[in-house]
């Protein structure tokens, strides 16, 4: 994955053509210097608000299983998860559950079940964003997909799509795991805890609040994109529909199993800006590199601070009581 990330970043930078006597780093640095730091700081504030609401939503999912955790520990664990995801794709999902266990004694298998619920809800919200983007920018997005060759192609014989292979492989894995659970009491206990977390969404006290939180989190993600787009002279003229389309492309790119979406984000989003809205390729690449770097920096700062605080809280918790 790291190799693929490096390749995609290299391909993206390779397309950054600058003037004579100017190097690519200086071009990106100039774009950073010319950006509005007010809008970028506002994006960071919005990002941490979205993380706080996500932490509160996680608390809601844990409550039906009898695990009533504090918002502070939920937030700390969530931020550590984001930090780990930057190095190990999807590793943050496990690490934040383990950190919450160390802070609150919440069973890892139960909290991981709630994380799976979160991911399912996020996929549904992503599909909603994509559908909305197609509604407002149908012609441009269809032309964009056509130019990429999506939906085209022909051939003889039986063609099994990729998703069908993935479903088949997933069912085989689940079948094998289920067989192991049947024969192992410890694994069965883990599965029961995971099942309890997975079904927590059906036992929420306030399901409408959960739905509101889920939609509001994604609205804040959209607002983050809007803030960064407004921070640059080359993109601040883009309207609501354009921001929505770019946000949808970015969300798809970030969903790729790469560290923090690096590489996929730097490839898909500049291509969309160039092909959909005729932005100069160099400006589009510089914009995306700064956007992703700034977003990553906020996660690193928040994650490192959360890691330090968690370390001292866990150490204090495990001190012998006098």
Image: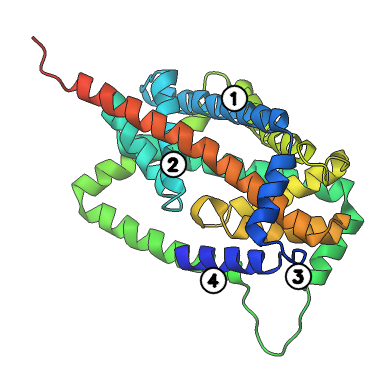
Query: Where is residue 216, by image quadrant?
Result: top right
Q: Which residue, given by chain and number where applicable, does mark 1 sit on?
A: 49
Q: Earlier in the sequence, mark 4 or mark 2?
A: 2
Residue 79 at x, y percent in the picture: 45, 33
Q: Which residue, given by chain and number where applicable, does mark 4 sit on?
A: 165
How crowded is the residue under tag 2: few (<14 C-alpha within 10 Å), some, or many (20+)?
many
Residue 40 at x, y percent in the picture: 67, 33
Q: Earlier in the sequence, mark 1 or mark 3?
A: 1
Residue 74 at x, y percent in the picture: 42, 26
Q: CA distance from mark 2 to mark 3?
A: 33 Å
Residue 83, numbered label: 2
Q: CA distance from mark 4 to mark 1?
A: 39 Å
Q: Which residue, given by chain and number where applicable, does mark 3 sit on?
A: 150
Q: Earlier in the sequence, mark 2 or mark 1?
A: 1
Q: Is residue 164 above or below residue 272?
A: below
Residue at 10 percent of width and 17 percent of height? 320
Q: Secondary structure at mark 1?
A: helix
């Amino acid at each position: 994955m790291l190799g693929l990330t490096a390749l995609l970043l290299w391909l993206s930078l390779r397309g950054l053509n600058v003037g004579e006597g100017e190097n690519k780093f200086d071009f990106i640095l100039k774009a950073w210097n010319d950006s509005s730091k007010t809008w970028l700081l506002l994006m960071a504030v919005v990002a941490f608000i979205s993380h706080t609401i996500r932490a509160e939503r996680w608390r809601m999912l844990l409550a039906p299983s009898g695990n009533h955790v504090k918002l502070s520990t939920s937030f700390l664990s969530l931020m550590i998860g984001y930090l780990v995801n930057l190095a190990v794709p999807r590793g943050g999902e496990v690490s934040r559950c383990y950190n919450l266990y160390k802070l609150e004694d919440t069973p890892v298998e139960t909290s991981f079940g709630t994380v799976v619920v979160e991911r399912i809800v996020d996929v549904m919200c992503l599909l909603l964003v994509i559908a909305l983007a197609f509604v407002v920018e149908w012609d441009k997005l269809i032309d964009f997909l056509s130019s990429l060759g999506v939906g085209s192609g022909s051939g003889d014989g039986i063609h099994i799509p990729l998703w069908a292979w993935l479903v088949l492989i997933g069912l085989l894995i689940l079948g094998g795991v289920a067989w192991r659970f049947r024969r192992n009491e410890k694994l069965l206990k883990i599965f029961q805890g995971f099942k309890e977390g997975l079904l927590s969404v059906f036992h929420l006290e306030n399901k409408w609040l959960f739905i509101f939180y889920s939609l509001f989190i994604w609205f804040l993600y959209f607002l983050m994109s809007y803030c960064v787009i407004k921070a640059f002279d080359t993109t601040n003229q883009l309207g609501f529909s354009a921001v929505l389309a770019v946000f949808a492309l970015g969300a798809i790119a970030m969903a790729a199993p790469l560290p923090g979406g690096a590489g996929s984000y730097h490839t898909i989003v500049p291509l969309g800006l160039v092909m959909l809205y005729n932005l100069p390729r160099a400006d589009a690449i510089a914009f995306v590199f700064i956007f992703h770097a700034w977003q990553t920096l906020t996660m690193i700062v928040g994650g490192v601070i959360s890691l330090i605080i968690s370390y001292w809280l866990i150490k204090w918790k495990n001190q012998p009581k006098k």
